[in-house]
Image (spheres, helix red, strand yellow):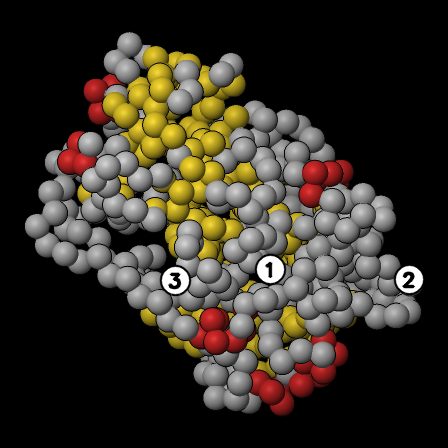
């Protein structure tokens, strides 16, 4: 069972970092929506779950925190802190007293908000004791996305000594910890909720789209993966009309700076599974070992790992500190107008302890129908059409491997040469296919993804990047070493 160590003080702190210096030279082969330097305004929302209302994106997370943005770059804090006066639930200590008492907690965990057909917004809240799966989950409803929300009641409990909500003896190694909900519509308009953390695994329930509650008679629902306190949590579902797959995003490891948090994904043609990874492994087998707490090696081989701890190691004359520590508990969004996919998550940073901020990265689907994540945060860019001379040169190279570890992967220097070879820290071949598709063969392993020009905030200019994944479920990144800082 995980333990939330992020303090209320940390969750209400607003970290801002605007990069608005003038005079930056921007590459003329830009695919960004603007030629000006992008401006980022950062916020702290742990476990951000995204929902769009009109022209504004909102993220809701733990500790009754929320933020909003119109461009996914500049964010404004809406709320934070489980205390009376929070605009989301102004009298939260009384409104959710039953939940807080059951969980023996003074805070709330990862929330999720969805708008149903009645036009109202439904906030799925939850609380957990922290050192045990003593948890409760319910829903609160509002006419406005920013609240106030009125409690409609608890519908799931866990951690009890005795009979659980499914009428059977509650066994924490097999039954769910009822936290981390994500409620979503499938392609046919049917409502579901996926949820769970550590303990007995990740589960899915059919929901009633009129009431917002689970349909009766399901107990805890159907298990998708996990058991025996496997460190897998934060499930989030995204359907792609391009591939007709449901993508189940997950976070492995511990959320703290030394926990090795990392983001993974599996897919299925049905929202209730079975889900498989890129190797064709059934995710139902991603579980711990009976009698062993947090047996990471047992389940680390499962799922496509999208990103984990990394740092682009500094070279002489380059900006420093460009990397993430324990990125995780993501949500995802597909824009059916632009066709863009986004990954939204919180992350810590090298040398900054438990400070955390929201980050948004663009995602792409590779030729095998698997998501690959852009190396740099989203800055309004749109993938373009490139030529071979655009992508040759030296890169910071990161291999995210499949480990669950607090170690930070430091980038290495490689070069993509004009003759299609890869030299430097690793060797192999590369190819640009079509407008921007990338195929790299490194040490005999084939990685498929895309080349894309992005804004490198540390270098303060646009650079060519690549992101690609292998059939073994390993992701690699490359970020061009800019000419101005070689």
Which residue position is annotated with label 3?
A: 57
For label 1, the SS is strand
Q: Earlier in the sequence, mark 2 or mark 3?
A: 3
Q: Is residue 23 left or right of residue 472?
A: left
The residue lying at 60 percent from left, 60 percent from top is: 183
Query: In what quadrant of the picture does the N terminus appear?
Result: bottom right
Select label 2 or label 1 by which is in front: 2
Do labels 3 and 1 touch, CB within 8 Å?
no
The residue lying at 66 percent from left, 38 percent from top is: 300
Q: Is residue 462 above or below residue 354?
A: above
The residue lying at 28 percent from left, 40 percent from top is: 454
Q: Is residue 329 above or below residue 26?
A: below
For label 3, the SS is strand
Specify the label residue 168 is tagged with: 2
Where is residue 328 drawn, in percent x and y?
A: 52, 52
Gap in angstroms between the C-alphas marked 2 and 3: 41 Å
Where is residue 445 drawn, in percent x and y?
A: 52, 18
- Can you tell which quarter of the image residue 281 is in? top right
Where is residue 192 drawn, in percent x and y?
A: 65, 56
Q: Is residue 421 above or below residue 45?
A: above
Gap in angstroms between the C-alphas marked 3 and 1: 17 Å
Question: Is residue 177 or residue 153 the one in the foreground?
Answer: 177
- Find the residue positioned furthest to the left: 23
Q: Earlier in the sequence, mark 3 or mark 1?
A: 3
Question: Is residue 224 or residue 210 the one in the foreground?
Answer: 224
Which residue position is annotated with label 1?
A: 183
């Amino acid at each position: 069972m995980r333990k939330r160590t992020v303090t209320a003080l940390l969750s209400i702190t607003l970290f801002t970092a605007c990069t608005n210096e003038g005079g930056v030279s921007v590459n003329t082969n830009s695919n960004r929506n603007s030629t000006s330097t992008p401006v980022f305004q950062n916020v702290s929302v742990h476990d951000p779950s995204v929902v769009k209302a009109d022209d504004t994106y909102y993220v809701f997370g733990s500790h009754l925190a929320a933020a909003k943005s119109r461009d996914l770059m500049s964010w404004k804090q809406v709320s934070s802190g489980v205390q009376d006066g929070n605009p989301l639930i102004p009298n939260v200590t009384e409104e959710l007293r039953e939940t807080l008492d059951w969980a023996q907690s003074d805070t709330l965990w990862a929330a999720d908000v969805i708008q149903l057909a009645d036009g109202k917004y439904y906030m799925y809240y939850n609380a957990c004791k922290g050192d045990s799966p003593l948890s409760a989950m319910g829903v609160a409803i509002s006419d406005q996305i920013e609240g106030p929300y009125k409690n409609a009641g608890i519908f799931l409990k866990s951690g009890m000594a005795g009979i659980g909500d499914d009428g059977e003896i509650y066994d924490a190694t097999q039954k769910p910890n009822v936290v981390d909900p994500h409620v979503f519509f499938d392609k046919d308009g049917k409502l579901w909720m996926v949820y769970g953390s550590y303990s007995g695994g990740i589960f899915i329930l059919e929901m009633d789209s009129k009431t917002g509650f689970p349909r009766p008679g399901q107990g805890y629902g159907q298990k998708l993966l996990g058991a025996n306190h496997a460190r897998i949590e934060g499930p989030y579902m995204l359907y792609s009309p391009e591939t007709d797959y449901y993508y189940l995003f997950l976070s492995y490891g511990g959320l703290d700076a030394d926990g090795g948090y990392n983001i993974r994904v599996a897919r299925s043609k049905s929202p209730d599974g079975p889900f498989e990874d890129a190797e064709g492994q059934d995710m139902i087998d991603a579980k711990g070992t009976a009698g062993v707490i947090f047996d990471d090696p047992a389940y680390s081989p499962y799922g496509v790992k999208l990103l984990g701890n990394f740092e682009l190691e500094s070279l002489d004359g380059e900006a420093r500190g460009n990397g993430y520590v324990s990125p995780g508990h993501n949500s995802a969004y597909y824009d059916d107008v632009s066709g863009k996919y986004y990954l939204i998550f919180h992350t810590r940073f090298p040398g900054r302890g438990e400070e955390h901020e929201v980050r948004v990265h663009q995602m792409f689907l590779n030729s095998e129908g698997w998501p690959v994540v852009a190396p740099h945060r989203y800055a309004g860019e749109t993938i373009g059409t490139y030529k071979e001379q655009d992508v040759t040169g030296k890169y910071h190279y990161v291999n995210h491997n499949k480990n669950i570890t607090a170690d930070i992967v430091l980038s290495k220097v490689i070069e993509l040469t004009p003759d299609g070879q890869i030299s430097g820290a690793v060797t192999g071949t590369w190819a640009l296919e079509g407008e921007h598709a990338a195929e790299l063969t490194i040490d005999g392993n084939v990685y498929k993804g895309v080349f894309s020009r992005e804004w490198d905030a540390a270098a303060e200019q646009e650079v060519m990047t690549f992101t690609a994944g292998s059939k073994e479920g390993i992701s690699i990144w490359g970020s061009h070493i800019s000419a101005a800082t070689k």
